[in-house]
Amino acid sequence: MCAGFITNPVGAWSLLVRVLARPLLFRLSPPRLVLEHFLVGASPPNALEAGVRQALRLVNPDVLARRVRAVLDCDAREDLARTNIPMMYIQADSDRLVRADCFEEVQRLRPDTMLTSIAAPHLVFQREPRKAAEVIMRFIHQLPG
């Protein structure tokens, strides 16, 4: 699980996010400051910022708004509790979308979940692909059999 959550990840900000999660908002190109603050971190590579902007343009604004509202209504606790495979949680230590305590919620249901933190913003795989690959490979190699 990477920069993930099993219930609403924004906590006290839920009402504001729900009010803002309208298609009209997603028709606008987000300012660079917003992308840096919430997704790509400070001074992102130009290709990463351009890629995020292109991805946002390719998705219908109605779909983006519905996905944000679905995140706010998420509750996968029962599903997670039923799993019995080895798990690792990769936490982006500069994530401004998914609160750090989202891992604690995962750990309550799956205390065997291994935590790995990477110095990165929310888009940790895109910002730190080599580090992410290294921690995933270490996790895989330590699995039994």
Image: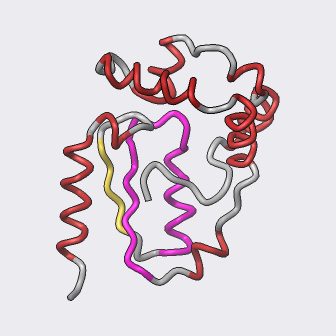
Instruction: Report x, y in % for residue 76.
Output: 65, 66
Q: In which quarter of the image is the C terminus?
A: bottom left
Task: Say if 90 sits above or below 14 in the image.
Answer: below
Is 111 included in the stretch rendered in magenta? no
* Range covered by the magenta-colored residues: 85-110
Q: Quadrant of residue 144?
A: bottom left
Count numbered badges in the picture.
0
Image coords of residue 16 (percent x, y): 77, 29
Estimate the x, y position of residue 21 in percent, counting from the top left: 75, 30
Q: Where is residue 66 in the image (x, y as percent from the top left)?
A: 75, 41
Residue visible at 31% across and 34% down?
127
Instruction: Determine which quarter of the picture holds residue 42.
Output: top left
The quarter of the picture where residue 59 lies is top right
Identity of the residue drawn at 56% across and 55% down: 5
Which residue occupies the foreground of this view, 104 or 33?
Answer: 33
Please give left or right for residue 98 compared with residue 142 in the image.
right
Q: Which of 33 and 112 is in front in this view?
A: 33
Task: Determine whether 129 is above or below 106 in the image.
Answer: above
Which residue is pictured at 24% across the width and 67% down the height?
Answer: 139
Left or right: 29, with 72 as reference point: left
**Relative to the observer, which residue lies in front, 131 or 62?**
62
